Image (cartoon, rainbow, N blue to C red):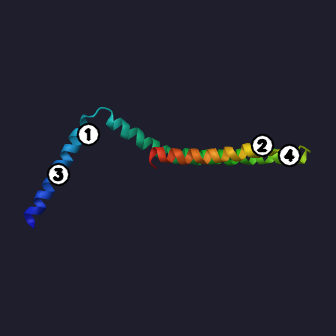
Amino acid sequence: MGPRVAVIFSVANLTLILAQSSAAQVPGLSEFHQASAEIRHYYFSLSDLIFVIGAITGLLGGLRVYANWQGGRHHVDRQVAGWLFSCIFLNLCGVFLRGLFGL
């Protein structure tokens, strides 16, 4: 069992060395990994910021619809649909970007 483990360990080391040497030869790979790490670092902060902005604009939109309703303009269907679909769009953008960046 000892020689078998040594062979597996040697093959694993050789594979690791080949992978590292081939990765070092690809230009721009380290920059790509650095940019990917920065995107992952900032994604969650930006995601929270976008949700806060979406919540504030949703509240303002709701107040605007309420003011129009109280002002006697009862045809606010387009405004309600616009705000609803913008909230759905905001959530779908977040899901799409999370899938795009693999987070």
- Nearest the viewer among 99 and 51 is 99
- Nearest the viewer among 14 and 37 is 14
In the rendered view, does 6 fall on the left or right side of 40?
left
For marks 3 and 2, the one nearer the N-term is 3
For marks 2 and 1, the one nearer the N-term is 1
**Kind of residue sitting beneath label 1:** Ala
x 76%, y 45%: residue: 61
In the rendered view, does 38 fall on the left or right side of 23?
right
Q: Which mark is residue 13?
A: 3
SS assignment at label 4: helix
Marks 3 and 2, how far apart in space?
63 Å
State if disc 1 and disc 2 touch (CB < 8 Å): no
Q: Position of residue 59 (x, y in %)?
A: 74, 48
**Kind of residue sitting beneath label 3:** Asn
11 in relation to 1, above or below: above
State if disc 3 and disc 4 touch (CB < 8 Å): no
Q: Which mark is residue 67?
A: 4
x 33%, y 33%: residue: 28
Q: Residue furthest bottom?
A: 1
Marks 2 and 1, how far apart in space?
53 Å
State if disc 4 and disc 1 touch (CB < 8 Å): no
In the rendered view, does 86 fall on the left or right side of 7?
right
x 11%, y 59%: residue: 6
Label 4 Cα neighbours within 10 Å, binned few <14 / some 14-19 / many ≥20? few
Q: Position of residue 87 (x, y in %)?
A: 67, 47
Marks 4 and 2, how far apart in space?
12 Å
Marks 3 and 1, how far apart in space?
15 Å
Q: Nearer the viewer, mark 4 or mark 2?
A: 2
Q: Which mark is residue 79?
A: 2
For marks 4 and 3, the one nearer the N-term is 3
The quadrant of the image that shows the N terminus is bottom left
**Kind of residue sitting beneath label 4:** Ala
